[in-house]
Image: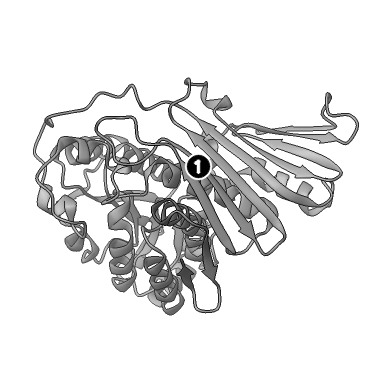
């Protein structure tokens, strides 16, 4: 085990001093809610320790350092500039859980530094960034896992087998929805604790400090693509996985106006994506709906000509033609949707050790991000948007 670990670390560009141990030293970049959850998930795996934490918001940094230190008995090194963390030769892999506008630059820098990468979705903000990231990955020897955990989820893997077996017949349409409500969230005027606003903005356009932009960055175009991009990347990746789909041919979207006084992006959006595999994916998101229990807030319906599959977070059901009142097949995840993240992290760590391709590499991460990027371009230009697979460019 130790000899093979020395070999793969040397091949990956990691210092041989680090290879004397079977430990995988991980650095966390972005210690908000999701980043902290991922940090603790990584820590729960054998032979993994959090060696460093980086954040530009002091309360997040201090909380993550404390949690990590208590869990592993040693406090990670604190960084306020991610570039200094990437210079740390003892770190083998990094978690990038920052706002979306930083993903592209940080992944490129991490690859250049010889680090394996677990990066949250959506992978990037623009099609051009996605193409650049795919090219960088192809030149690199590093492992990159995009945080689209359905790829590692037992429920979705079993459902993919049912579709591939032809049980549903020909599937020409998938209908998906996700319902919640963020209109009740209260605008914020100030933050508790110190924030390096200049560094947080990073590659985004310069704006005066705004606590709402920091707290609710997902809903501002400078930093993300709105709720349709944030949740749509998950949903469309699930469609791609179940249908073994490639990049979309075209995307069309429609939306209502934004109703939250502090947000720029709409909360109610419908996206229609066309695929060369001869099906369309229809995704409706409404964050102005009533709030559902988590296990009931989303559903994907695969409309085959022999049967229909309904798949949500926790279970899937198959209904045969003529017997749609009673499912012919029911599969429920034994551990539940939260366990999908554990499985996804575990898959990444296995690939860090083996150097095999993980379940959600950059190509698949970009494929999902591209659909929602094209949806936003469709909203902006008021038309159907095409993807030219040969030139890898969007055509308006």
Q: Residues within 10 Å of mark 1 (few under 14, many from 20)?
A: some
Q: What is the quadrant of residue 308 in the picture? A: top right
Report the residue at 88% width, 36% height from top. Answer: 321
List x then y, in percent, for residue 170.
Answer: 81, 52
The residue lying furthest to the right in this view is: 322
Task: Give above or below for 193 relative to 283.
Answer: above
List x then y, in percent, for residue 33.
Answer: 32, 36
List x then y, in percent, for residue 301.
Answer: 69, 38
* Colour setting: one colour
Residue at the spot of label 1: 342
Task: Give above or below for 170 relative to 302.
Answer: below
Report the residue at 19% width, 63% height from top. Answer: 83
Q: The residue tagged with tag 1: helix, strand or loop? A: helix
The residue lying furthest to the front in this view is: 382
Q: Which of 95 and 304 is in front in this view?
A: 304
Badge count: 1
Residue 153 appears in the picture as rendered? yes
- The reply, left or right, for residue 307 in relation to residue 387 is right
Report the residue at 60% width, 48% height from top. Answer: 238
Residue 79 appears in the picture as rendered? no
Q: Which of 305 and 314 is in front in this view?
A: 305
List x then y, in percent, for residue 13.
Answer: 35, 75
Q: What is the quadrant of residue 131 in the picture? A: bottom left
Task: Give above or below for 87 relative to 274.
Answer: below
């Amino acid at each position: 085990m130790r000899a093979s670990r020395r070999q793969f670390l040397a091949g990956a560009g990691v210092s041989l001093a680090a290879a004397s141990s079977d430990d995988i030293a991980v650095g966390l970049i972005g210690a908000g809610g999701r980043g902290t959850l991922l940090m603790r998930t990584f820590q729960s795996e054998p032979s993994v320790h959090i060696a460093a934490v980086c954040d530009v918001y002091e309360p997040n940094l201090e909380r993550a350092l404390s949690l990590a230190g208590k869990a592993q008995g040693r406090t990670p090194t604190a960084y306020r500039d991610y570039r200094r963390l990437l210079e740390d030769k003892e770190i083998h892999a990094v978690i990038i859980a920052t706002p979306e506008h930083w993903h592209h630059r940080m992944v490129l820098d991490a690859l250049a530094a010889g680090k394996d990468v677990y990066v949250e979705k959506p992978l990037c903000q623009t099609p051009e960034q996605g193409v650049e990231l795919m090219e960088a990955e192809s030149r690199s020897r590093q492992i990159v896992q995009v945080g689209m955990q359905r790829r590692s989820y037992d429920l979705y893997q079993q459902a993919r087998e049912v579709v591939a077996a032809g049980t549903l017949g020909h599937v020409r349409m998938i209908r998906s929805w996700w319902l919640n409500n963020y209109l009740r969230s209260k605008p914020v005027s100030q933050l508790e604790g110190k924030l390096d606003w200049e560094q947080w903005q990073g590659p985004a356009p310069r704006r005066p400090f705004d606590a709402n932009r920091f707290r609710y960055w997902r809903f501002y175009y400078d930093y993300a693509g709105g709720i349709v991009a944030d949740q749509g990347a998950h949903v469309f990746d699930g469609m791609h996985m179940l249908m073994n789909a490639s990049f979309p041919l075209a995307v069309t979207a429609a939306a209502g106006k934004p109703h939250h006084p502090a947000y720029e992006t709409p909360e109610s959006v419908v996206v229609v994506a066309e695929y060369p595999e001869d099906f369309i994916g229809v995704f409706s998101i409404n964050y102005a709906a009533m709030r559902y229990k988590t296990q009931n807030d989303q559903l994907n319906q695969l409309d085959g000509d022999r049967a229909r599959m309904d798949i949500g977070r926790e279970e899937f059901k198959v209904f045969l033609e003529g017997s749609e009142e009673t499912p012919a097949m029911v599969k429920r995840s034994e551990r539940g949707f939260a366990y999908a993240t554990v499985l996804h992290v575990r898959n990444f760590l296995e690939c860090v050790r083996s150097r095999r391709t993980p379940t959600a590499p950059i190509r698949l991460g970009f494929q999902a991000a591209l659909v929602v990027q094209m949806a936003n371009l469709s909203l902006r230009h008021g038309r159907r948007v095409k993807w030219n697979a040969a030139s890898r460019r969007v055509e308006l």
